[in-house]
Image (cartoon, rainbow, N blue to C red):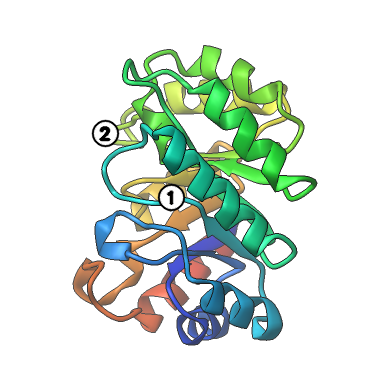
Amino acid sequence: MRLEIVTTTLDETLQAAEAGADRVELVSGITEGALTPTYGSIKGVHDHSPIPAFCMIRPHNQGFVYSKNDVEEMVDDIRNQQGLADHFVLGCLTEENQIDEEALKKLVDACGTTPVVFHKAFDRLEDQKAALHTLAKYPQIKRVLSNFKAKNIAEEIDRVKEMLDYATSLGIKVTFAGGINADSIRVLKSIGAEDVHISSAARIDGLAKNKLDLDRIREFRKLCDM
């Protein structure tokens, strides 16, 4: 199972790699739910990191509904980081919590051939199967970041597996995110999940504001390899 850790700098990315991460999601504003990383951080990671960086594109922490100005800012950020990010991580919704396809098309077009991950905004969507069909229309969108709204993965594992299989049938991979811990990693491995994403749980005391907890990351690595 592949292990993705959220980092905010080149130093954190190098630490995560040393502790066993397969890749990072590079962000700024981690205490604000993860925002677009700086050009300097993505350039440094691109030039010096031994592992891939999936780069967040999110201009603010006020939800996932974006104005035209927000979308233009996101497009400019994508273009500015083109060739540096291994994947772009993004998502956009309407006021009714549907996928904003007008905005999504502009963003995906700006990404060019760089693969795209539709992030945890996916878990705001009511009909996730219909949403997967929408995302499957875009060849660049290779993956979703989701736990399929499970409050307890172990207790909802049959439904979670059904959704994983459904996404796979449409050619979309799933990186499980949201409340991932030792128990959920074990359960997810039992249904063939291939990727987990860990943010605050990889930090000291499980708090986003704190430094990475390298021992915790090493433990997650062992669990992913079991």
Q: Is residue 63 left or right of residue 77?
A: left
Name the residue: 54% across, 79% down: 40
Disc with the residue nearer the chain's start (2 vs 1) = 1
Q: Position of residue 158 (x, y in %)?
A: 45, 23
Q: Amino acid at mark 1?
A: Arg
Name the residue: 61% across, 48% down: 194
How far is disc 2 from disc 1 in space, using C-alphas?
25 Å
Q: Position of residue 172 (x, y in %)?
A: 67, 32
Assess whether mark 1 and mark 2 are in contact (beta carbons under 8 angstroms): no
41, above or below 162, in the image: below
Q: Quadrant of residue 54?
A: bottom right
Secondary structure beneath label 1: loop
Q: Is residue 128 left or right of residue 22?
A: left
221, above or below 168, in the image: below
| Badge nearest the viewer, 2 or 1 | 1
Residue 40 tag number = none
Q: Position of residue 143 (x, y in %)?
A: 62, 39
Name the residue: 56% across, 22% down: 102
182, above or below 193, in the image: below
Secondary structure beneath label 2: loop
Q: Amino acid at mark 2?
A: Lys
Q: How many marks?
A: 2
Taking the view exactly as shown, the residue that stands out farthest to the right is 113
Q: Is residue 79 left or right of residue 177?
A: right
Taking the view exactly as shown, the residue that stands out farthest to the front is 69
Name the residue: 37% across, 15% down: 126
Residue 113 visible in the current orientation: yes
Residue linked to disc 2: 151
Depth check: give the residue in front, 77 or 199. Answer: 77
Q: Position of residue 225 (x, y in %)?
A: 58, 64
Residue linked to disc 1: 58
